Amino acid sequence: MKNSHFSRAGFILAASGSAVGLGNIWKFPYMAGEYGGGAFVLVYLLTIVCVGFSLLVAEILIGYSGEKDAVSSFEELAPKKEIGWKYAGFMGATGLLIMTFYSVVIGWILYYVILSVIFLPTTMEAAQQGFGDLVGNQAWTQIVFHLIATVLIMSILLKGIKGGIEKTNEILMPILMLIILGLLLYAMTLDGFKESLRFFFVFEFSKLSSEAITQAVGHSFFTLSIGMAAILTYAASLPRRTNIVKAAFWVVFLDTSIALMAGLMMYAFIFEFNQDPATGPGLVFISLPVVFSQIGTLGTIFAVLFFLALAFAGLTSAISIVEPTIEYTMNRLEWSRLKSTLIASAIFFIVGVFTLLSYTAEYGAIFTFGGLPLFDLLDKLTTNVLLPLGGLTVAIFVGFVVRKERVYASMSEFVSKGFFEAWYFNIRFIAIPALVFTLLNLVGIIKI
Ligand code: PHE
């Protein structure tokens, strides 16, 4: 075993660290608020169970069997005459696009960790104004915090798989889980908790719009880190004879439970203090600080812990989003880890500056295309188009291109033939049609 390999438990932590991110604690709660609560949650859960889990197994399988960067792993597994499939590995580049807004948001979060210590807004207006001012007027503050986020991410990645990625996840993931669990336990004592449960689990058919479906499906991919070779790249450094199905199960289980726990906790606070659940991306930056300010000193502690947990979740995902590019440039272009990390980080840092400028009053117009600020454009392009497309590519590759015996060989030791067949069928005849349908729905060819 190379010492650049994960341990088995280390892999599960790192892959869960990738999955559990801003998607769970920042995006999921506000999306549920925007797209109809229970209806959104139902589609999200269904996609995860029916498609997400199988696809995650498929992605891990490609990395685990290929044992290299994504491009080389696709090349290794494709039958000789279909070597063009190696280009599918370039889906890893989606990561750089995601990072251009992900790192900006981690910057906001770091800013809010500090802000929570100094001062929490006590009214909704003040909170709205504070966040609006940061995003709309304070370009330099944002650039500084985006730079701090970039430097933190780089410093982890420079230490490689074992000393950087595995170690960081081993430290940050347990702390993150404890903080969310602690806050949830407190939230369960509030009356708002019942309302929160109702909000998440009562399903109203009328709220199920075609947009809500697209968003929920896209988000399932985003939250499981599927469709851009992130966990695939981690899986290339797995020790042999690892039960990849069990590993995938843990990742899905932890990711989904942490999203639901964080969502239930936040809405319990929000309902308890009569705040608005549908404030969009500003939810954690606007409604929550006001809520925490009303709990006194304990509230300040909650706020700091909450934003720290959010920062940890973001960082452990960010490193997995950049690593595919680093592994590719190291393996195929023979760059050093230093050079790969510096160049990849410089790219997302610089484009990230344009992304954050797209929300500012002064430069917004320059970075707005077809009515969409660059920030939203990149978020929607990656979440709703590129990740589902990446997922579809993985499903077609594993379901129809790689020889079935080869696919079976990578898990035969750990699962029954029946399980394998059910999973294989799921990839071929459920995941693929579901993905095609979602993508068509997106371009408006099929309108539900
Ligand atoms: N899953 C991460 C989150 O929920 C984001 C991510 C997307 C990470 C794609 C890796 C790949 O925040």
Image (tube, rainbow, N blue to C red):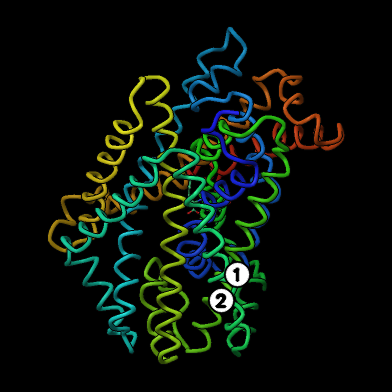
Under circle 1, the secondary element is helix
Q: Is residue 15 visible?
A: yes
The residue lying toward the viewer, choosing from 237 and 109, is 237
Asked if disc 1 and disc 2 are in contact, CB closer than 8 Å, the reply is: yes
Q: Count neighbours of disc 1 (C-alpha within 10 A) and say few if under 14, some if 14 to 19, many if 20 or more.
A: some
Residue found at the very far left of the displayed protein:
362
Q: Count neighbours of disc 2 (C-alpha within 10 A) and say few if under 14, some if 14 to 19, many if 20 or more.
A: many
Q: Is residue 47 visible?
A: no
Give the image location of residue 311, x and y in percent.
Answer: 41, 62
Under circle 2, the secondary element is helix
Q: Is residue 416 left or right of residue 306?
A: right
Give the image location of residue 337, x and y in percent.
Answer: 36, 31
User: Which residue is at a point 55% across and 22% down the rendered structure image?
Assistant: 74
Displayed quadrant of residue 145: bottom left
Give the image location of residue 31, x and y in percent.
Answer: 49, 64
Pointer 2 residue: 265
Pointer 1 residue: 261
Give the numbered dot on residue 396. Answer: none
Q: Is residue 302 left or right of residue 236?
A: left
Q: Is residue 371 above or below residue 182?
A: above
Residue found at the very far top of the displayed protein:
81
Q: Amino acid at mark 2?
A: Met
Q: Amino acid at mark 1?
A: Met
The residue lying toward the viewer, choosing from 379 and 26, is 26
Q: Is mark 2 within 8 Å of ligand 1?
A: no
Q: Is residue 312 above or below residue 275?
A: above
User: Which residue is at a point 77% across and 33% down the rendered structure image?
Assistant: 425
The residue lying toward the viewer, choosing from 104 and 410, is 410
Quadrant for the N terminus, please: top right
User: Which residue is at a point 64% across and 77% down the rendered structure image?
Assistant: 197
